[in-house]
Image (cartoon, helix red, strand yellow):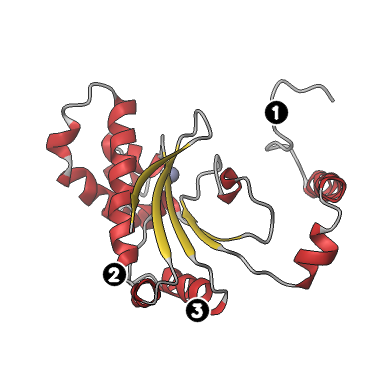
């Protein structure tokens, strides 16, 4: 079928389409890397990196050019790393203590919906029961709202929404990086010189990463 998008599936795709797409993907992976599934992925995993990113559909650990088996991943809206978050704590323990990754990448991105929601005053309407009815999302984005408030003065110097949003994406990576650095599992691994932590921003319009901060 001739399509004017590069995408594989659409909202109209059903289970059969997903399974057909998967067969095609598996076949092409086998052609490109015949040993990947039988000799590596089928025998376990030894990931070198933990990738923490936003749940946004436009990027994931593959922006590092890696194959399945190289990167352990945790994605969450606006890549918020609350040190009290049980999922985050469990992910850090499993990746660092059990899988022995030696790098943690905290990777935000440009044009982040969570950041733009706060920037454009769309946070309050989220909790409107007659409207979007996203009370949990409203509660969850509190961290980004706090960041937005603390950066208000700096933000005024950027003329466009895109520039403000990109600036906050960078600030958010620094903020979440600092949260990760408070975690005991991370702290102990750094002291033992077994771990490095990097903060990056992925540009959705180029596929390129900007370095922001490192330990
Ligand atoms: Zn995002």
The one nearer the camera, 126 or 193, is: 193
**Which image quarter is the C terminus in?**
bottom left
Q: Do tag 2 and tag 1 residues touch (Cβ < 8 Å)? A: no
Residue sitting nearer the eye, 208 or 136: 208
- How many numbered discs sit on the rendered protein? 3
Q: Which mark is residue 6?
A: 1
Marks 3 and 2, how far apart in space?
Answer: 16 Å
Between the C-alphas of marks 3 and 1, the distance is 39 Å
With 144 as the anchor, is 51 left or right in this view?
A: right
Residue projecting furthest to the front: 193
Q: Which mark is residue 28?
A: none
Residue hosting label 2 = 182
Between marks 3 and 1 in the image, the one whose residue lies nearer the viewer? 3
**Label 1: few (<14), some (14–19) or many (≥20) C-alpha neighbours in 10 Å:** few
SS type, badge 3: helix
Dot placed on the residue nearer the N-terminal end, 3 or 2: 3
- The answer to which of marks 3 and 1 sits earlier in the sequence is 1
Look at 83% across and 51% down and name the residue there.
Answer: 26
Quick check: 139 above or below 4? Answer: below
């Amino acid at each position: 079928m001739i399509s004017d998008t590069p995408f594989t599936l659409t909202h109209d795709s059903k289970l059969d389409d997903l399974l057909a797409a998967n067969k095609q993907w598996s076949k092409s992976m086998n052609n490109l890397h015949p040993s990947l599934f039988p000799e590596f992925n089928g025998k376990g995993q030894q990931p070198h990196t933990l990738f923490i990113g936003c749940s946004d559909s436009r990027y994931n650990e593959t922006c590092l050019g890696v194959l399945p088996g190289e990167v352990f991943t945790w994605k969450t809206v606006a890549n918020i790393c609350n040190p009290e978050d049980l999922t985050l704590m469990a992910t850090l323990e499993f990746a660092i203590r059990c899988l022995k990754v030696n790098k943690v990448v905290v990777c935000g991105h440009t044009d982040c919906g969570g950041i733009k929601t706060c920037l454009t005053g769309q946070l309050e309407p989220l909790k409107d029961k007659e409207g979007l009815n996203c009370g949990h999302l409203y509660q969850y984005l509190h961290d980004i709202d706090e960041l937005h408030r603390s950066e208000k003065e700096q933000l005024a110097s950027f003329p466009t929404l895109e520039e403000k949003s990109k600036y906050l994406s960078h600030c958010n990576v620094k903020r979440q990086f600092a949260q990760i650095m408070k975690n005991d599992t991370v702290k102990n691994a750094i002291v033992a010189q077994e771990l490095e932590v990097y903060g990056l921003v992925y540009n959705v319009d180029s596929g390129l990463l900007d370095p922001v901060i490192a330990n």
